[in-house]
Amino acid sequence: LCAARACGQQAENERADDRGRRLLLAKMEKHVEAAVPLGADPVAIVSERLLMARLGGSPEEVLRWADELAELAGPEDSSSHADLVLARFEALMNMDRRGDAFALSGEMERLRPLVSADERLTLDSALLLNALYRADNTASGDAASFVTGVRGLVEQGAIPRRHAVIVLRNMAGQVSQFDRFGDALTLALGAYEADSPEDPVMPTTMIALWIAELGAKVGNAQVARQYLGEATRWSEGAISASPGTTDDRVALRVELLFAQGRTLHLLAELRRRP
């Protein structure tokens, strides 16, 4: 099961539609299947199946495995209960059942002081989404406070830097779905600053392009141009270093060009505004 969890953690770094993620999930499935006849803990088995469903993008499967985990996990197993409430939240959001998702906030608040810093961060992510979704469109300091909190956890060694990047990147994407582009920009900038790899990597390039697009959406042409330049600086090295076939690299280059085009279009619209 340790090998299965390692595959799952690696798959989280891959894009949802990436071939690498699909291969890792297939490996994860094999490890879990191999653990069943060895008498592995049923709670651990279901936890891994729940993670596979989350990474596989099937909200109905997520809810099914979350219900099964709720039946197996004891009341003192706060970690498993945190996993299943977060899985339910994510699945319900993906199903556009936001009211049902945010109704879980009370259980999240109850679990916060009972879990590790890593798990508490994920609970806080969901609670931040709740706060921003229910707020009006005025400026909020909640996103900036969240970024500061994540930065503090990294500095304390409580969470790995890479996990912080994933959390902030995912949060920016979810917040942008509420059209709160200013908060999404704050979170995306936090992800980029937390990343800062020495070598060009595709996630860094895509975060920079996303920041550029968000900057244009909020009318900040300076940020848009700056990060469009950052993305261009990273892109060629990232594509060359990317694993996969020539077709995969061509697909990445096309994706980058489309992302650059969206930002340039938004910048052109900004210039046309009176």
Image (spheres, grey):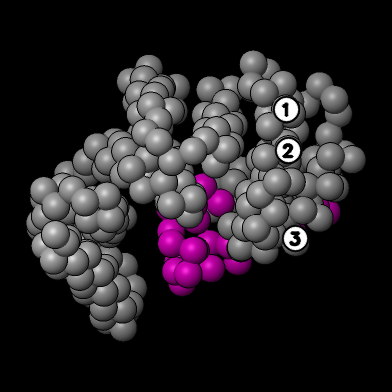
Q: What residue occupies the far bottom of the structure in this picture?
A: 247
Return the x and y of residue 11 as percentages of the image width and height: 50, 56
Where is residue 113, by image quadrant? top right
Magenta segment, which residues?
A: 8-37
Q: Do the residues labelled 2 and 3 touch (CB within 8 Å)?
A: no
Q: Is residue 162 visible?
A: no
Provide the residue designation for mark 2: 103
Residue 106, disc? 1
Q: Residues within 10 Å of mark 1 (few under 14, many from 20)?
A: few
Q: Could you tell me which secondary element the residue under label 1 belongs to? A: helix
Residue 61, disc? 3
**Which one is in front, 121 or 237?**
121
Q: Could you tell me which secondary element the residue under label 2 belongs to? A: loop
Return the x and y of residue 59 as percentages of the image width and height: 69, 59
The dominant secondary structure in magenta is helix
Looking at the picture, which amino acid does disc 2 mark?
Ala
Looking at the picture, which amino acid does disc 3 mark?
Glu
Q: In this view, does 113 lie above or below 105?
A: above
Dot placed on the residue nearer the N-terminal end, 2 or 3: 3
Residue at 46% across / 46% down in the picture?
175
Q: Could you tell me which secondary element the residue under label 3 belongs to? A: helix
Residue at 81% across / 43% down in the picture?
69
Residue at 33% across / 43% down in the picture?
182
**Which one is in front, 72 or 17?**
17
Q: Judge depth for marks 2 and 3 and give the one in front.
A: 2
Q: Is residue 62 visible?
A: yes
Does 69 appear in magenta? no
Cα distance, mark 3 to mark 1? 24 Å
Q: Residues within 10 Å of mark 2 (few under 14, many from 20)?
A: few
Q: Is residue 109 left or right of residue 149?
A: right
Where is residue 155, by image quadrant? top left
Q: In this view, does 173 lie to the left or right of 23?
A: left
